Image (cartoon, helix red, strand yellow):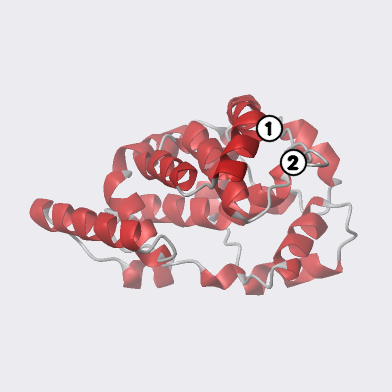
Amino acid sequence: MAMMEAARIPLNGWQRKAVTVGSMVGALLDPGRADLVHALAETTGQQAFVATLQRMKNNPEGMEVLRDRPRVISSTIQHLYDLPSNTFGGTYAKFMRQRNFSPDDRTPVRFCESDDLAYVVMRSREAHDIWHSLFNLKTNLIGETALKLIEFEQMHIVMGAMAFVGGTLRFNKKQRDLFNSHYFRWAIRAGLQATDLMCVYYEKYWEVDVEEVRQRWGIVPAPPPPEHG
């Protein structure tokens, strides 16, 4: 947690509003600016993160996560690249390797009021790619938009809803038709059916078969796109 503590910046009321407005404008102009998107999530999602923290405290496995504060970073997941591809950890490692993603590229938490909240925010960021691999969602615009809907259903973060709406507005007609006919209802069902994924101690299940953990956590993977969709 020292790394997250060092990055945190305390904000008073007007400073929080200024960061919110500035981040919102910047994120709208350039949705690829992850630092602005994450800053907006932190300043507008306090209630949702507090509620998530409370749910984790009330859940035995979630409480273990809060106690141990595991991190999904390069130094803790190198062994996953040696796991069989049918395992949960091997599936996640394959997802990361195919996209040349590093788990260390997440924006540090800056605007949370406590160590516990800062950890919850960072945990949600590090879980993002885990959820991509569990739900079998690509990192294209459709996949990211579908996952934002699932994240909103799981955590009720305002930024998640905004990102979902922003994603749909960027669809071309073909993408919009495909999303509405093939992914929208699935994403709603998938987000509601899954267990509280912020209360899962993922690190304990890396070596378990991925289909077994999907069943355990109520994960319904994204259906394959229509052959001619």
**Residue 158 found in image quarter:** top left
Badge nearest the viewer, 2 or 1: 2
Residue 195 visible in rendering: no
Query: Mark 1 and mark 2 in contact (Cβ < 8 Å)?
Result: yes
Q: Is residue 127 left or right of residue 7?
A: right
Disc tally is 2
Residue drawn at x 72%, y 38% as measured from the top left: 222
The disc labelled 2 sits on which kind of residue?
Gly
Residue at the limit of the structure toward the front, as seen here: 173
Label 2, on which residue? 229
Residue 175 visible in rendering: yes
Q: Position of residue 120 (x, y in %)?
A: 45, 50
**Callout 1: helix, strand or loop?**
helix
Label 1, on which residue? 182
Of 84 and 53, nearer the camera is 84
Q: Position of residue 23 (x, y in %)?
A: 27, 59
Disc 2 from disc 1: Cα separation: 9 Å
Q: Earlier in the sequence, mark 2 or mark 1?
A: 1
Residue drawn at x 89%, y 52% as measured from the top left: 86
